[in-house]
Amino acid sequence: MQMLFQWDMSEQPPAKLEAKFWRAAKAAESTREFANRLFEGAVKDTAAIDELIVKQAENWRLERLAVIDRAILRLAIYELLTTDTPPKVILNEAVDLAKKFSSEEAGSFVNGILDAIHKSLSNK
């Protein structure tokens, strides 16, 4: 999420952001690989992910969303689309991130968007 936030603010190459991020953050190699895979995939698929967000975020333009909320949504949607992590876990983690890094209201907003996207993906 933090790398996606930084990328959205500066649009630096993902590899450069990863190198900078991991100099300061400590994590097991498997955690780094998983985080980098999610980050790189979300960046690569931003256009498709953003389309899903816009469809569900009625009366909200993507540019009006808080940068941190966009990062959380992009990360969670990419994870929903590409991993076998249970959707409930992804949604709960995203809501917790929104409450911690954005606002209490953001938790409800993120939950609503992700729940709607999850339901639309389940119906395909």
Image (cartoon, rainbow, N blue to C red):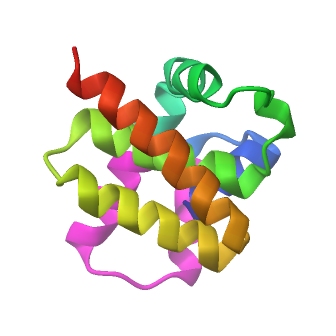
Q: Is residue 48 left or right of residue 58?
A: left
Q: Quadrant of residue 102?
A: bottom right
Q: Taking 118 as reference, is 108 above or below it?
A: below
- Position of residue 4 measured from the top left corner of the image (x, y, whole percent): 60, 51
Residue at figure coordinates x 33%, y 47% from the top left: 37
Q: Is residue 25 magenta?
A: yes
The relative height of residue 25 versus residue 69 in the rendered view (above or below) is below
Q: Residue 87 location in percent, x, y? A: 25, 50
Q: Quadrant of the N terminus?
A: bottom right
At which x and y percent is residue 17?
61, 55
Q: Name the main secondary structure of what is drawn in magenta.
A: helix
Residue 43 visible in the picture: yes
- The answer to whether residue 72 is seen in the rendering is no
> Of 39 and 77, which appears nearest the observer?
77
Taking the magenta stretch, the answer to whether it contains residue 117 is no
Residue 55 is left or right of residue 80, and the answer is right
Indicate whether 108 appears above or below 44: below
Residue 123 is left or right of residue 2, and the answer is left
Residue 99, x across and y down, in percent = 62, 74
Magenta residues, start to end: 15-40
Q: For the point 50% across and 53% down, which residue is it?
A: 111
From the viewer's perspective, is residue 63 above or below residue 5?
above
Q: What residue is shown at x 42% (from left), y 48% (from top)? A: 76
